[in-house]
Amino acid sequence: MTFDYTSMGFYTFDALCRPVTDLPPGGGTYFVEDFALAVSGAAGSAAIVAAKHGLKVQAVGGVGNDLMGDWVLRRLGDFGIDTQNMQRVAGMTTSSSIVTTRPDGARPALHKRGATAGFFVDDAAIERVTDTRILHVGGVGLMDRMDQGRTAEVMAAAKARGAITTLDVFAATRDDFAKVRPLLPHTDYFMPSEEEATALSGLQDLDAIADFLLDQGAGAVILTLGERGVMYRDRSGRSFHIPAYRVEVVCTCGCGDCFNAGFATGLHLGLPVEDCVRMGQAASAQNATGLGSQAGVTSLRDTLNFMDSTPLRC
């Protein structure tokens, strides 16, 4: 395989500041302590963390013909990420967010939907897109053209070539499940947040949610639960819960996306699935210690050291 990890889907330009407790009235100005720019999104954050961990990474998505798109592509290149299949989508701007980070790490955001909705993997690109050991799809629900059935075709092609497939979503309602259901039979590891899984399934009990998603064809379901850690269930009956690491939270933007890349790093290293989840938790926790997606993640060595030295929440 040419690539260790291909991250396909939602790439966004983020401007982040903290701490923000309110917006100034009228045309006023409040001063903040920190300001940062980041490539983010369910595919973007994962791609960068995987690259920081030493994987050979391919980015697949869309940006606009604008300054934000220029910056996103340059920044991906800074980490050695292949951008041949990052499309410049005509008539669309780069997906962009302003993230106002609260003192507790919460991150209310203002988002401009953009080129993520317009990119498309055509027949000529499928061979290269699927030339990967792990295919990650992040951002289902925002990829308007791909969500019409093309994502399922790409995932099926990747599976046929022997790739491991992982899936994350951007979903807020039960209606979004119509876009997710066709993908689950081609998904080895489905990794939504608790909130996303609840919205998609219409259920509240975590075991019932996992059963429902496994019944739809997913090989395994990994529910990220924030400070409560991670719940894992798979079709073989394996089930476990791993607590979150104890860290001082600066910003939670991108934590779930960084988890996805940490988990994939574990798969790449051939670790047992429990250790893959722990590595995902470590990437997520490190991310929370900085402003902007991936800010706290530096290298595989540092992630391994973090896992050895950082206590878990009870």
Image (cartoon, rainbow, N blue to C red):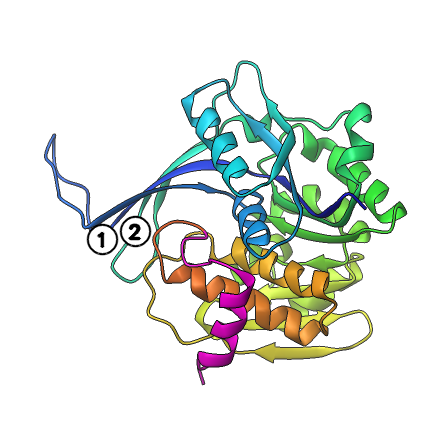
Label at residue 19: 1
Left-right relation of 304 to 145: left
| Residue nearest the viewer, comparing 125 with 112 | 125
| Residue nearest the viewer, comparing 8 with 310 | 310
Label at residue 101: 2
Segment colored magenta = 294-314
Amino acid found under the numbered disc labelled 2: Thr
Label 2 CA crowd tier, 10 Å (few <14, some 14–19, many 20+) = many
Label 1 CA crowd tier, 10 Å (few <14, some 14–19, many 20+) = many
Label at residue 303: none
Where residue 9 appears, x then y in whole percent?
A: 62, 38
Amino acid found under the numbered disc labelled 1: Pro
Instruction: Using the image, determine if residue 300 lies above or below residue 79.
Output: below
Where residue 53 appears, x then y in whole percent?
A: 58, 57
Query: In percent of the image, x 47 and y 73: which residue is there?
Result: 306
Question: Which residue lies most toward the right here?
Answer: 160
Q: Quadrant of the C terminus?
A: bottom left
Quadrant hosting residue 261: bottom right
Query: In percent of the image, x 67 and y 51: which residue is there?
Result: 167
Left-right relation of 113 to 4: left
Instruction: Using the image, determine if residue 219 lies above or below residue 93.
Output: below
